[in-house]
Amino acid sequence: MASIPRVVPWTSPQEYQNVYQWLYSDSPELRELGVKRVKAWSSRGKIPQSIVFTAAFVEASLRDEFAFGKIKISNYELRLLYSMAFIRFVNGIIDPNQGKYAKSVASIAHKLDMPSWFVDLRHAGTHEHLPSLQVLRKGCQQALKWLEDKYWTAQKPIISTQIDEIRSLIIDYKKYSKDPDSNKKISTNNVLKKISNLITAEYIKDLLVPVLLENGYLIPKGKKKRSSRSNTTLSMKLIEIWFPMLQKFGYEWPTFYDELVQEMLEKLISNDEGEIYINFSDQLEIFQTSESSQPKNISSSYLFTLVAWISHFLEISYAKKNNSFIKLDLENILEFCLRNPNLYTKMILEFMTNHDEDLRENIAPFMIYIDKIDVSKNNQSNLKEIPIFTDEDMEKEVWNLRKEFNKTFDLKQNSKDSSTTENSLNKDSNLDSAWKLYNPDEWKKCPMGCLPNGLIPCLDFSLDLDGPSIFIPEPLDDDVDMMLTGE
């Protein structure tokens, strides 16, 4: 049975590494940014305790570093802050390692290679006089070093080492698949089993998919073996070699095909030399990926072969319908192609509309818009003769499409009650309720989760809400300031 993917609050491994670098940066501004991001993660879901403890120690050290600024913090307050961080740190590391029978904190700490004086600091902060500020500062530095060695650094080599191993296994699979020996099925199955044991579903996108999309695997190195604009089909030899492996991964991880197709789609828009490309989400702030995973220039034959693979997956998905072993998120593919129109995504849209008559009617305005952009791109010398298609025109097209879609949806849902019309829906919407229909003339579309201007808001917690920030330029009100400073 395939394992359930682990949900994490960070959007990408790059964000995770960024936060690690911020928390251990020499810059206090970056360290505070790391603390804010960890608090934002905590609001989204459960995060590893080691991350929480790291942020707690960093925040305590920041308060210590700026203790004599505009907002003064006494030595006793700093000792309390450090001591509480140590108590939560030691208890949080030790408690999960308690077995059926209670063991001493010191014995568990020894097994975890935790310095014994961490336990002493925790004991003193809990039951005795608070440790001195000098000892706590030294302990904070050592605790951050211990967390870096035991947690943060331990996470870094996963991708770099395992990708090399996965690449080596896929090379073996390719060699065995071409071998005419009758035992090749046993050999290839053994390789696939090793790959399945090496990674889990949550690392498909970061470990397995990038290797499959390198030159020489799903995409042949020789351009003659690739697809072209006039022939976006896969050769039978290519399917015979790689499809058994893809089937195995699809059975092992239900999300595999979605992850693979999504990465293929991303590569279709990664470079745009001579092709139409308008990104409707330019204002969305996303985390940058490494140059190796997003090459600046990809040959057209590579991209046409990606289109051929996606079309092949869609063909199987449409043919088998609910019984297909390839279950793709068709809505996600459709939305991606509509938001990122270029030659390659247009070919995918045309393939989807050829297999879905209702879809063809619904997205007809979008296809007209893409065609107009294509014409304007290919006839740049005659731009003055081409009608200008503005964003306002696009908004009208989208609104008309939405209106027609709602009509169709209402007819299907209310087929038994022919008297239900759009007027009655509007009438119901005007009843006393917390929900109201928005005026379509004032409505401007934006991606879900964005502000009205189309920007993604910064979700980091402001330290103004969690406590006085060390970088507040203006002082607080006089009365509050006197209470905090003791003056």
Image (spheres, rainbow, N blue to C red):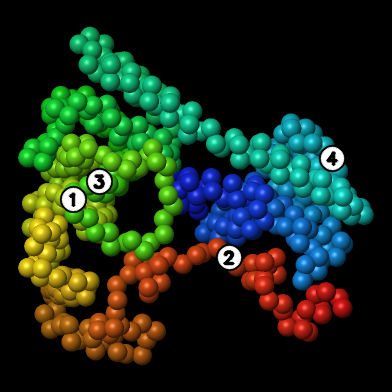
Q: Single out the mark in the foreground, 1 or 2.
A: 1
Please name the residue that numbered disc 2 is placed on.
461
Please name the residue that numbered disc 3 is placed on.
268
Q: Are marks 4 and 2 in contact (CB under 8 Å)?
A: no
- Please, what is the three-letter code of the amino acid marked with disc 3? Leu
- Please, what is the three-letter code of the amino acid marked with disc 1? Glu
**Residue 178: image location, x then y, percent:** 22, 16
Mark 2 element type = loop
User: Which of 287 and 167 lies nearest the eye of the viewer?
Assistant: 287
**Residue 387: image location, x then y, percent:** 10, 70
Q: Residue at x 11, y 52 (%)?
A: 350
**Residue 380: image location, x then y, percent:** 13, 59
State how many labels appear.
Answer: 4
Q: Which mark is residue 117?
A: 4
Q: Is residue 119 above or below residue 337?
A: above
Mark 1 element type = loop
Q: Residue at x 80, y 75 (%)?
A: 484
Mark 4 element type = helix
